[in-house]
Image (cartoon, helix red, strand yellow):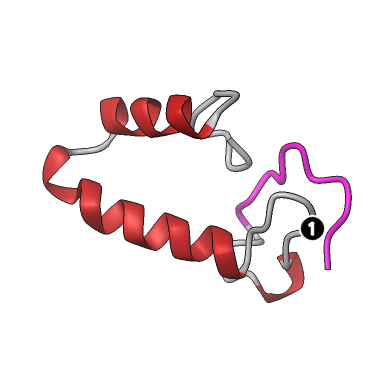
Amino acid sequence: NRWGYVHTRTPEQTEMALRRRLPPRHWRTYNDLLVSFGQHLCHPTSPWCSRCPLSAWCPRRGVRHTR
């Protein structure tokens, strides 16, 4: 949601939206990458935008406070 790739309200809705848009053979890999990214950099409440390698391309939707 933060990147604007999907527009959902719950983790379950996000998973289903991503499954519709991504090739099935890559689901596990994408999931592992996105979960780790969310746990270490792109926290829901205060993301580490200053450390993010994608910050130049991220529209930061819904971000009110960053580190």
Residue 58 inside the magenta-drawn segment: yes
Residue shown at the point (45%, 57%) measured from the top left: 35
Residue 61, image x, y percentages = 72, 38
Residue shown at the point (34%, 52%) measured from the top left: 31
Residue shown at the point (26%, 37%) measured from the top left: 22
Q: Image height check: is 60 above or below 15?
A: below
Report whether 60 appears left or right of 33. right
Amino acid type, mark 1: Ser
Q: Image height check: is 9 above or below 57?
A: above
Report whether 48 appears left or right of 7. right
Look at the image and tell me in which quarter the N terminus lies. top right
- Per the image, label 1 sits on a secondary structure element best described as loop
Report whether 60 appears left or right of 2. right
Residue with the most extreme bottom position: 51
Q: Image height check: is 25 above or below 37?
A: above
Residue shown at the point (43%, 56%) measured from the top left: 34
Residue 38, image x, y percentages = 56, 58
For the image shown, how many numbered marks are present on the structure?
1
Look at the image and tell me in which quarter the C terminus lies. bottom right
Q: Considering depth in this image, is 26 or 59 the residue closer to the camera? A: 26
Q: Quadrant of residue 49?
A: bottom right
Residue 28, image x, y percentages = 23, 53
Residue 42 inside the magenta-drawn segment: no
Please tell me whether the stretch drawn in magenta is mainly helix, strand or loop: loop
Q: Residues within 10 Å of mark 1 (few under 14, many from 20)?
A: few
Q: Considering depth in this image, is 20 or 9 the residue closer to the camera? A: 9
Residue with the most extreme left position: 25
The span shown in magenta is 57-67
Residue 43, image x, y percentages = 67, 57
The residue tagged 1 is: 46
